[in-house]
Image (cartoon, rainbow, N blue to C red):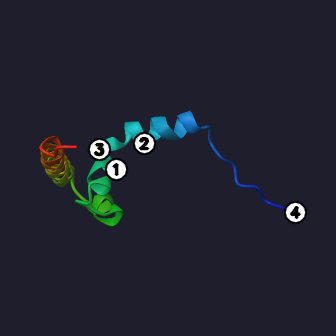
Amino acid sequence: MERRCQTKPEWKIKQRVENEMWYWFPIMMGISTREEMNTATYEQIQILNEVAKQKQELLNLGRDNVDV
């Protein structure tokens, strides 16, 4: 018998990612890996999120100064 992979509606996936942004944000910004996030303490996760936020702000500052 053929097994089929069940998928969830796109809105549910987006909602889950938004709800778990505290986990994904440092990973997306290249500050941390999934493995590091899985073993980090709550305090470490807070620090990683703050570093990711500051990196995002620095990247946005550089973009604001570029003339197109």
Given this view, does label 2 or label 4 mark the residue nearer the observer?
Answer: 2
For marks 1 and 3, give the CA distance.
6 Å
**Residue ID for mark 2:** 17
Q: Are marks 1 and 3 in contact (CB under 8 Å)?
A: yes
Quickly name the residue at label 1: 24
Q: Quadrant of the N terminus?
A: bottom right
Please state the horizontal and vertical placement of residue 67, each as a whole percent of the image.
17, 43
- In the rendered structure, which disc, 3 or 2, sits on the residue that comes first in sequence? 2
CA distance for labels 2 and 4: 33 Å
Mark pair 2, 1: CA separation: 7 Å
Amino acid found under the numbered disc labelled 1: Trp
Mark 3 lies on residue? 22
Residue at (26, 54) in percent of width and height = 29
Q: Are marks 2 and 1 in contact (CB under 8 Å)?
A: yes
Q: Earlier in the sequence, mark 3 or mark 4?
A: 4
Q: Are marks 3 and 4 in contact (CB under 8 Å)?
A: no
